[in-house]
Image (cartoon, coloured by chain):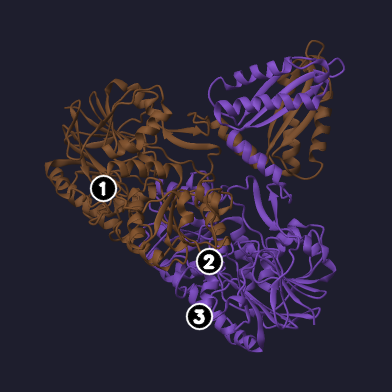
Chain colours: A brown, B purple
Amino acid sequence: MGLVQVIALGGVGEIGKNCSVVREDDDIVVVDCGLSFPNEEMLGIDIVVPDFTYLVENKEKVRGVFITHAHEDHVGGLPYLLAQIDVPIYCTEFTQALIKNKLEEKLPHKKIDIRIFKPGDRIAAGKLEVEPVRVTHSIPENCSMAVRTSHGIVFFTGDFKFDFTPVDGKLANITRIGELGQEGVLLLLSDSTNVERPGWGPSERVVSEGLRSVFAEAEGRVLLTTFASNIHRMQQVYEVAAEMGRKVAVVGRRMEQNLDTCERMGYVKIPKGTRIDLRDTKMFPDKQLAILTTGSQGEPMSALVQMSKGEYGRLQVKQGDTLIYSARPIPGNEGAIWRTINRLFNQGCRVIYDSAKPIHVSGHAYQEELKMMINLTRPYYIAPVHGEPRHQFLYNKIAGDMGYPQHRMFTMKDGIPLCMDDTSASFGERVPCGRVLVDNSGTPGVPDEVLRDRNNVANDGIVVITIPVDTTTGQMAGDPEIQARAFSGPEGILNAAYDVLFDALSALSKDELKDTTRVKHDAGDVVKRLIQKRTGLRPLVLPIVVEV
Amino acid sequence: MGLVQVIALGGVGEIGKNCSVVREDDDIVVVDCGLSFPNEEMLGIDIVVPDFTYLVENKEKVRGVFITHAHEDHVGGLPYLLAQIDVPIYCTEFTQALIKNKLEEKLPHKKIDIRIFKPGDRIAAGKLEVEPVRVTHSIPENCSMAVRTSHGIVFFTGDFKFDFTPVDGKLANITRIGELGQEGVLLLLSDSTNVERPGWGPSERVVSEGLRSVFAEAEGRVLLTTFASNIHRMQQVYEVAAEMGRKVAVVGRRMEQNLDTCERMGYVKIPKGTRIDLRDTKMFPDKQLAILTTGSQGEPMSALVQMSKGEYGRLQVKQGDTLIYSARPIPGNEGAIWRTINRLFNQGCRVIYDSAKPIHVSGHAYQEELKMMINLTRPYYIAPVHGEPRHQFLYNKIAGDMGYPQHRMFTMKDGIPLCMDDTSASFGERVPCGRVLVDNSGTPGVPDEVLRDRNNVANDGIVVITIPVDTTTGQMAGDPEIQARAFSGPEGILNAAYDVLFDALSALSKDELKDTTRVKHDAGDVVKRLIQKRTGLRPLVLPIVVEV
């Protein structure tokens, strides 16, 4: 019996790009493979995925990637992993339905090996074994993952809450979690996103109440925006709308796709005659209409944002409309979201983004639910995941209050293995790990240098100097030029820069002029220094010697 | 008796750059002259100030700028206004103390005409008259402004709350506000920032309780970060520290300056022996130390952020420290603030950013306080300011609940005059108005085109094409070159671009090559189109013809 190693390739000390590894000897199981969203310093970055080097280097040992649920922070990294190694994906039928098209779109020439499991299955993965257990969350068919090792179970809660009245009626299998606890949980890796919230979170079900009261009060049409993956929310809208005599149309490609898939598979049950096409909304009075739309994150190309600007051809917002903002802002999107909401108000649309009766609830466990999970699993070791350092700190404080001593609680860091055997646990040597930035073209691996240049130009602009040189004679072959873009600064600054440039070039001998490296250095240097001294600005300066 | 016009040059439909105009015939009074902070789309912008064209065009009519209080969103635009026109500034002695140095720094060659008022003074301004009235806020010596016109009083609440136990003991002059209401308020312009919050806001005083309990529980040093202008908060820290037997040191230039000024003028009373120099902290055990620091907005150059990175020479954070985050994030700064807090946790410093007993309270009125202000002033017309459209909407809803009919409530927009006489009110013709962007060099007036280029380069980079042409012969004088910066994209894309560029240039006749505009257009076009087609990226493409 070797060591059991648990390594997060993403998802600890941060919220996003969840990807964890359990390894015992030559067998590796991966749990989740997510993406995260760029922060405001990552200019021109579309998404961020984990660095998969460790998995690539050990590809013959990887038995499978086990997916807890279909949210992007748990599945969005898959195309980038599968582009590098062949490995089977294990997930529920529902998860497959949501991710399959996207994987095939991104990897058209690849045979994707997806294997379906049901909660309660026990899947052999080398000497490891994986057992998904049903838990509740804001998406159907969500699972915790119990990974059986020879030293006990490594239990990933995945994202969870204990919701006793879930929209689809499918309860968490608490009893099974308790049984696994009795069998022996070596390590609990617990969701900690909502550890700052005391008490027990509200059920998804209460949102129906909130929707009902907004629907009842609305003078005209009701619009509702949420995540395209929030199937339960859409189900609730259909039910409340049917009850209140409203028809529902859907706007937004991904939402329509998901809804079609889920309706076909029976995960959404739409009351007869309630769903209508957007084109047919004209046939009904406003009081009998509801509209589901994407755009809850203020995405510039989304229907909602375009509606808020009056630029969406298929639907116009108008006086008397009510929009329900039924989502949470992903950090970083707040500005875009508030701008959208304000624009909607300006068009006479009332936006409900907060209300006495909740119109959105979180899918993550509050403090008492987190304690309940500890109580059920009774793990020997404990480590919060799916949280930033502040969440990890608070989670361990709570576990400490439940009696856990310091040496049985860990604050994991991405890439640092937690190594355990029957008698001890400690951190090992860091494995290759990090963030891979994917740009707007979908190409992963944007280098740090490019980001630095982007920040540089974004702040202070770019100054391009062209210097035509006849390198055979060592003479200038024309006048140098200075052009600036994305650059502001006080009047006359570029003329002053031209003067020092001209003087610097005039001072060079023929031999020095033949040395293009020298010319570039001198030209860049004088211009950069003059601008910085006069203005405090540090534009990116790009000197180009044109050899003729 | 002419029309009374009220024009917001900033500060309605937004939170920030407050600047309002009251005009009757040839007399203009300006209330406040603030700045706002850039949103995440305004790359490389330091601050935003109002467009003062209207005041410049009417400069001989402007009788004075009346400042309610010394927060940046009410005074930060002054240097940019005073650079354009000469006008006296009216403010309290305290406000003057905080703004004078800064104005003199920014306008070294200008004689600044500051005139001190006390609440209750009546200041003639042509045929208008201005009466400042004391109200409570999160800064000392804060005033509402009653502007007397021949049709009644235009009452600016300024930023306010009704705090019955303010830290400095100076209560709002509610009686005077009531008297003005009896005299006749034509228009109430009310703070609406906190209109989403029901009830009555907590007094600044309750923060002392919160501080006391954190101080009592802290194992080691206590650090507290807040705005450098939050004089009351600093007063509270000194009092609680003295009570608990801790010495207080200050880190951060602006905070030290403000504290020195306020101590000298008696606005802060530091218990004897409590203030120590940072250098002397070594002489005391951690349990006897507290430290006040700037950096509450995650400013990269602030002491706190540098401490969180372990890069601040004068003070290191360590295990056992407790930091109290006693401020609110200015929208847009959340990311930087959380990153700072997480780094502090990683260094073993516990950060208290939320607590059962408040460690920060808002300086703005909640719903019941807003109603109280309406009740006291009993205005004929009403208009919410200092709020985004969503706040304006909610404020008018509340006023509606108090019985105001639609035609007496206004949702103002920047630059659109509200014109009133004894019998009616309506919106007039828009005056010149807008936002002026100030870049990192302090130069106002960054053009939109520069911002567009910055966004462009920040997202997708820049591609520079140089084409050496002998314009006398119409021949290429060397090889064209393509250089990219801040650009990523798939491998080989620049080689492919070079190929199409080369082909395009080869296809040009001698006459066409002599036409530099044509060459630039063709070269830029083929490269731009190829990159966009292959990658979806839209870098800024800058073709340069080098004439030799």
Mark 1 falls on what kind of element? helix
Q: Amino acid at mark 2?
A: Met
Question: Is residue A327 visible from the viewing direction of this image?
Answer: no
| Chain letter for the residue marked with disc 1 in the picture | A
| Chain letter for the residue marked with disc 2 in the picture | B
- Which residue is rendered at x = 74% and y = 57% of the image? B105
Q: Amino acid at mark 1?
A: Gln
**In the image, residue A281 lies at what x, y percent?**
46, 54
In which image quadrant can residue B106 be found?
A: bottom right
Residue in the foreground of this view, choosing between A457 and A340: A340
Question: Is residue B392 visible from the viewing direction of this image?
Answer: yes
Asked if residue B174 lies left or right of residue A135, the reply is: right
- Mark 3, mark 1: which one is toward the viewer? 3
In which image quadrant can residue A33 be found?
A: top left
Asked if residue A262 lies left or right of residue B88, the reply is: left
Question: Which label belongs to residue B164?
Answer: 3
Residue assigned mark 1: A406
Furthest-top residue in this view = A472
User: Does the CB distance between marks 2 and 3 fall below 8 Å?
Assistant: no
The image quadrant where one finds the C terminus of chain A is top right
Question: Which label belongs to residue B234?
Answer: 2
**In the image, residue A118 lies at what x, y percent?**
20, 38
